[in-house]
Amino acid sequence: MRAGLGFYCHAFPDAVLQDPHCHAEQLEQLYDQLSRVAAYGAAQGATAVALEQMYSPHQFPWTIAGARDLICQVFRKGRSPLYLTIDTGHQTGQRRFVRPSASTVIEHAKLRGASGGTTSVWLGSRAAHDCLDTCVRNGGAVSDEDLSFIMADMDRHPFLFSQSDDADTYSWLESLGCFSPIVHLQQVTGDSSSHLPFTAQTNMTGIIHPDRVLRSLMKAYLHEAKNHGADAAFGVEFVGGERTNGGYKLAVKEPGSEIQYITARFVVNAAGLAAGTVAQAFGIDMNAAGYCLFPNRGHYYRVSSSKSRLVSRLVYPVPLPQEIGLGIHITIDKAGLCKLGPDAEYLNATPMNEWYNFDDSEARREKFYKAVQRYFPHLERQDLSPDQVGVRSKIQAPGAQARDFVISEESPRGLPGVISLVGIESPGLTCAAEIAKEVFRQIGLLS
């Protein structure tokens, strides 16, 4: 998959955590060592070298701020990027290490002194804990002097404490997801890194939801893009574009507003089913360029829960020559239920307002049933129910040979800086990051 290498291989001993000066020295050594690892990986052609984030003070990085510092410091030292591997179960320990307030320290000592209990509050260093233990043995009262010592000692050991956001998976993804080319997905309830599978049962109590993971990653990329001068506008209609001196002038329109204009040096046409319309707005001859799109609809049927339990993995048929897709296959959704699909039908003669209508005809059900019955013999026709429908932006005409994605910088057509992405269907989403890198290479911003 060319995602790179994600790993974890180090930890700080307790003696280092007790000494701020020693901890700072060890952290610098770690930055040096990881910068050499990153440089070696880059020299060997690794797509990405990524360090897995963990969830306790001796396993750096374990906080969002610490992870961001790691990325910056390693790059500063070696000029080769080191990325993160975010694990969706590695936010379960940080809540134990949130720094307490002075009033919490006082209240905790009183409760322990009165009850003789063994409840604990995290104070960071052994010295701070020893001081509080002495207060508890003396009845639970914390003197001003003792409280000042504990608070000052926590100030000296900031690397032993987390923030509330550090215990939230989605905060990690929203803050640093764009620096994590590899994300370790596991279902968890939030209590431990239990590595639960994604099944209908575990998803009912689990806190990891694929749609929210994807939204969080989108926010991370958008936030980082805005920090570097980019912006995004959603729900805006593209009206037209024209070449100007040094770039392009784009006309856009929000619902109920006047047309507005944007100037840009580069224009990336990644409009999916509307990519042809955008290309034509720049004067590209669709037939001559081979950019004509052929909308193609695919249906999915859901399998009953009783039969879904019989399947534990994806099942693909052997593709046939001249097939316009992978064929109807068995997939598993986030609820652990099976789906069959998609089929493939061209929509050139279908009005656009009917594209997303689910055609649940007897003939279609029979087609789906027969497509998988030979390797799913326990399936019965009544196990199928309509699930979803989508439309692909195929560049392959009916009856024609399969074609690859088009990723084309349009200088030969007199449009330097315009990049056309045409016919990007599955697996376009999966390889979106690689497509972006290819776009950057074609416009000379990435070697």
Image (cartoon, helix red, strand yellow):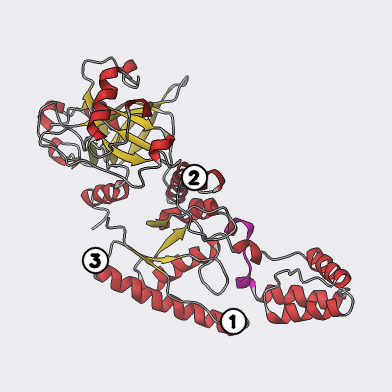
Is residue 393 toward the left or the right of residue 118 in the image?
A: left
* Residue with the mark numbered 1: 14
Q: Are marks 3 and 1 in contact (CB under 8 Å)?
A: no
Q: Are marks 2 and 3 in contact (CB under 8 Å)?
A: no
Residue 138 position in % (x across, y down)? 88, 80
Q: Nearer the viewer, mark 2 or mark 1?
A: 2
Using a 10 Å C-alpha cutoff, classify the residue at mark 3 as few (fewer than 14 neighbours), some (14 to 19) or many (20 or more): few
Q: Which residues are magenta?
A: 158-166
* Residue with the mark numbered 2: 209
Question: Which one is earlier in the sequence, the residue at label 2 or at label 3?
Answer: 3
User: Helix, strand, or loop for circle 2?
Assistant: loop
Q: CA distance from mark 2 to mark 1?
A: 36 Å
Residue 99 position in % (x across, y down)? 69, 66
Q: Residue at x 83, y 70 (%)?
A: 112
Q: Residue at x 11, y 33 (%)?
A: 322
* Residue with the mark numbered 3: 45
- Tell me if residue 161 is in the magenta stretch: yes
